[in-house]
Amino acid sequence: MKIKPIAIQITMSKFTIPYQNIRNKDIAEVGGKNASLGEMISELYALGIRIPDGFATTAAAFRIFLEENHLLEPLKQQLNQLRTHDMGNLTEVGKNCRDLMAKGTFNEALKQDFLAAYRILGQGEAISVAVRSSATAEDLPTASFAGQHDSFLNIQGEKELLTAIHHCYISLFNDRAIKYRVDNGFDHMDVALSVGVQKMVRSDIGSAGVAFTIDPETGFENAIYITSAWGLGENVVQGAVNPDEFYAFKPAIEKGKKALIFKKMGAKEHKMVYAKEGERPVKNIRTSVLERQSYSLDPEEVELLADWCYKIEKHYAMPMDVEWAKDGLSGEMFIVQARPETVHGEKEGVKVKEYSIRGKGKALVKGKAVGNAITSGRVCIVKSLADAHKVQMGDIIVADITNPDWNAMLKKAVSIVTNKGGRTSHASIVARELGIHAIVGTGNATEKLQDGQLITVSCAEGDEGIVYEGKLNWEVKELDFQALAPTKTQPMFILADPFRAFRLSFYPNEGVGLLRMEFIISNTIRIHPMALVKYDELPENNDKKAITAITQHYSDKKQYFTEKLSEHIAMVAAAFYPKDVIVRMSDFKTNEYAQLIGGRGFEPQEENPMLGFRGASRYYHELYREGFGLECEAMKIVRDDFGLDNVKLMIPFCRTVEEGRKVLETMKTYGLERGKNGLEVYVMAELPSNVILAEEFAAIFDGFSIGSNDLTQLTLGIDRDSEIVSDLFDENNGAVKSMLAQVIRKAKKANRKIGLCGQAPSDYPEFAQFLVEEGIDSISFNPDALLRGIENISKAEKVNQNPK
């Protein structure tokens, strides 16, 4: 059954208002949630955004309920007894308030208005509806009230509707809601409750979830983050399942390009469905194997949702927290709620704390990192509110999922670890509100960890959060961006882990001078590219079994490589867009390639892999050419399909100019043509031949990036992996600096950009000064060395401007 706007105008009354007659200005009468739904139905339906119809009961109805049942004074008396300094009697006061509310009844006028609106909504049928609380002080840009009051799904029939509305009224005095009002300075009796009655979307046989129009972890504004699971959306909101995750890129929506740049499949262990008649309205059941191993949204649906969320954000002119549902009968998508987003990770300001673990211990459990801090403490396993007495200040709460009723208890914790949930779950939201970090979706934390056990919780290692045994040592650095003056020489990043990109994009930078493709291949893809190209020809051994298992969702095994690589590169390119992101094509040595799954059968054994079959020489060679083709296809997807044309490509270890031409020709056969669609191709300047013939390399490439490590070892004839002669390795050596000066001057003369990637400019101020004096365009640093490097550049530029 398709859900369309109500054709019949519901007669206006004191006590109900149809959604199409509600606007954002009506918050005082229908609460933030209902005001937003009415606003979207009236203003956004023309843009193609579907919102299920419904109506709202008014704040006036709620106040009449209080007055006619003589509840105002008894409620005030109870609330005046609340010990707000320690909330020691909150449980007692809350229960007394709810008992008072439960004894109240609706007068005949209220009943008839509520039921008349319900009959018109269902066009005479006893339809299934969602009944949701909407407080008049909630969903404001500064106070979300999310999860404080009750909602009810699959309510069918007039008696059931009245009961659900009554229960919503009662929930204004939930313990968590009372405490939230105290914490946020709201007078209890100034807040009224409206109730939204909305047609149910049959997501019980479809899917549902939550979307943020801003990255909830970092506050990165160009991303839309969508979570999804099978069944009704309550499981995603509560954190009862580990959902699928999707990232969409806003500028791609504007350009009409493919916006879905990254996806990750969640376990989706359960789904909430309608219960049978005579049972509770909804229940949780196990998902099937097929459901757990399939995405709960297809790419086209993610694209549609992202477009809708972007339009909603633009309408409200602020980041939004959006709940959506897919009807399993009609296949249609719907927006069921939208509120201002108030709990995302704080956008990085002028001062940032960076945490780094010192020495690794035994990893006990892993999950999704929420925040970027490290802490240690005592495990306190919490199964229900009855365990609140166990929790002490400074504990790490470990639970299956968290519950809004736990908020007071959670304030004692220094971290939260849960079995289930994603980054839009209650545990994640509360952790951000409290300014602590969490690890969610571990799967087995309550089994692996023990009460009283000392652990370290680290969220400072990228996307993954890790719980370590015991108390480990870590370092905290406070970085002050305000003290840094802009520099002419561009500071850029050396990056490997894509999941640090959103956070790092807030640092002072001019993009990424070196994105190492190898990290993504070895840590995420894990399979040798040629083993995917030649999958059907592989011998039936353990490697093929592993490849089959890893790529089980891909009939074309090559697509696994191109999809994973393009998605991870896209996360970095999106983070820094429109600044340059220079991606170095793969630069493994043969011994490193051989370590990938299926790699030994495709790699020759070499005495000195450092000087052997690596970099450019692989790309056009029959042993790897088709593998390089997969790399090219992934880069084509990033640039052409996603519209991330800030990506530039870089060829490593290119020994001769002729070899450079061969590589460019090979790239062209795979659809990457230098100059087409603005594509620029750089070359690493890391061999003496690159320096000596720099003018000739400049004729076929768009720029240079100096690889100081390789150039130093090849200029001085030192194997940088040899401990015996490692003390002779020195970028400050006169011979090395002579090579650097030559290549910089030649690049500038040829009107080509040139940068350097390496540690030396941050470690040695005099080396940074040398590069600045030679006129280098950019210097790329590892993230932990960026600020020190910028300081060295700034000092060097001042000296250069004011020589003695």
Image: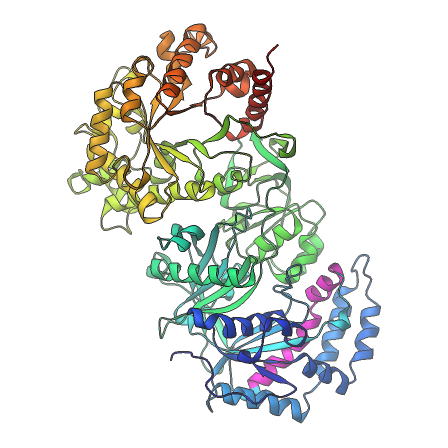
Residue 163 included in the magenta stretch of the image: yes
Classify 732 as above or below 588.
above
Residue 87, image quadrant: bottom right
Residue 41 included in the magenta stretch of the image: no
Classify 184 as above or below 583.
below
Residue 683, image quadrant: top left
Please give the name of the residue rendered at 28% of the width and 46% of the height, measured from the top-left corner.
551
Residue 422 at x, y percent in the picture: 50, 54
Residue 523 at x, y percent in the picture: 38, 36
Classify 109 as above or below 385.
below
Please give the name of the residue rendered at 37% of the width and 40% of the height, measured from the top-left corner.
524
Judge from the rendering whether residue 654 lies leftward or rightward of residue 737; answer left or right: left
Judge from the rendering whether residue 426 lies leftward or rightward of residue 631; answer left or right: right
Judge from the rendering whether residue 545 lies leftward or rightward of residue 168; answer left or right: left
Classify 645 as above or below 19.
above
Indicate the colouring scheme.
rainbow
Between 777 and 509, the one lying in front of the other is: 777
Residue 50 appears in view:
no
Residue 673 at x, y percent in the picture: 25, 37
Magenta highlight range: 160-184
Could you tell me how many numbered marks the image carries? 0
Most common SS among magenta residues = helix
Residue 484 appears in view:
yes
Please give the name of the residue rendered at 45% of the width and 38% of the height, measured from the top-left corner.
579
Where is the C terminus found, in terms of image quarters?
top right
